[in-house]
Image (cartoon, grey):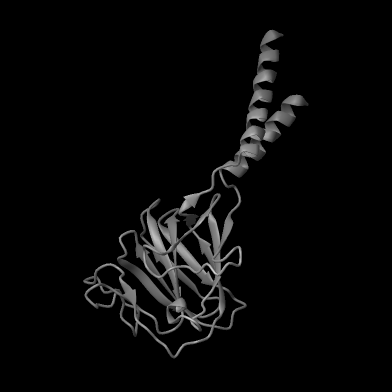
Amino acid sequence: MKRGWATLMVAAALAWATGASGSTWIEDPLGTGADAGKTLATAQVTSGAGSLTAISGVLDPGDDPLDAVDLFKIVAAGTEITATSDVGNTDTFQIFLFDASGKGVKGGFTFPGDQLDFTVLTQGATYYLAITLTGWFPYDSSDSPLFDESFFDLNSAAGALEYWSSNPGVTQDPPFTLELLGVEPATQAVPEPATLLFLGSGLLGLGGAAWRRRRR
């Protein structure tokens, strides 16, 4: 019985430490007005344990037109990422993916419930995921668009993301949720001391059970 309890403790602690369950990243978890940035230097760095299953936030260009764009740093868990906009939201969005250097990968227009697939990615590599209101597009330092503004075709000749085109006429402030597959947080959470103690207790219990078996 003691051995079974120790095994259970180890399994539970390992499940937490390895992130058996996914996590949701909230743009402003404390309600302090923390807004995701618009460039690689100011993008919010997602964190959590295990996979990243969703990102939630608000696009609010009422006070600042650039709040129509939110950029998040993520990691590709495999070679494909899917992003699905919240089915319950009545607003439309644009979603863009950039590589670690800020070069465009893919973009698309999404209605509620639409799914965008980003394929042939590098497993374990860093990417940046942007969600924007309609009419906002990324440009490089030479004023070249990273994507065609009509069909979202990638401009392979463009450089890295530098700024976003403005659309001051868009003033709505819709909340959004992106449901994600194939994504990990940019920073994996480290187990708290209490969890490490829990894991250590389980390992000691297993070690004691093995020692007692040898003594017999």
- Residue 205, compared with residue 170, is above or below; it is above
Residue 33 rendering spot, x and y as whole percentages: 55, 70
Q: Residue at x 21, y 75 (%)?
A: 142
Left or right placement of residue 102 versus residue 77 in this view: left
Left or right placement of residue 102 versus residue 215 in this view: left
- Residue 101, compared with residue 49, is above or below; it is below
Quarter of the image where one finds residue 99: bottom left
Q: Which residue ends up furthest to the top in the rendered image?
A: 215
Q: Residue at x 76, y 25 (%)?
A: 2
Quadrant of the image for the C terminus?
top right
Residue 176 rendering spot, x and y as whole percentages: 55, 74
Residue 16 rendering spot, x and y as whole percentages: 61, 44
Q: How many marks?
A: 0
Left or right placement of residue 26 versus residue 7 in this view: left
Residue 158 rendering spot, x and y as whole percentages: 24, 72
- Residue 182, compared with residue 13, is above or below; it is below
Q: Residue at x 61, y 51 (%)?
A: 21
Q: Residue at x 43, y 68 (%)?
A: 37
Quarter of the image where one finds residue 155: bottom left
- Residue 181, compared with residue 203, is above or below; it is below
51 or 164, nearer to the observer: 164
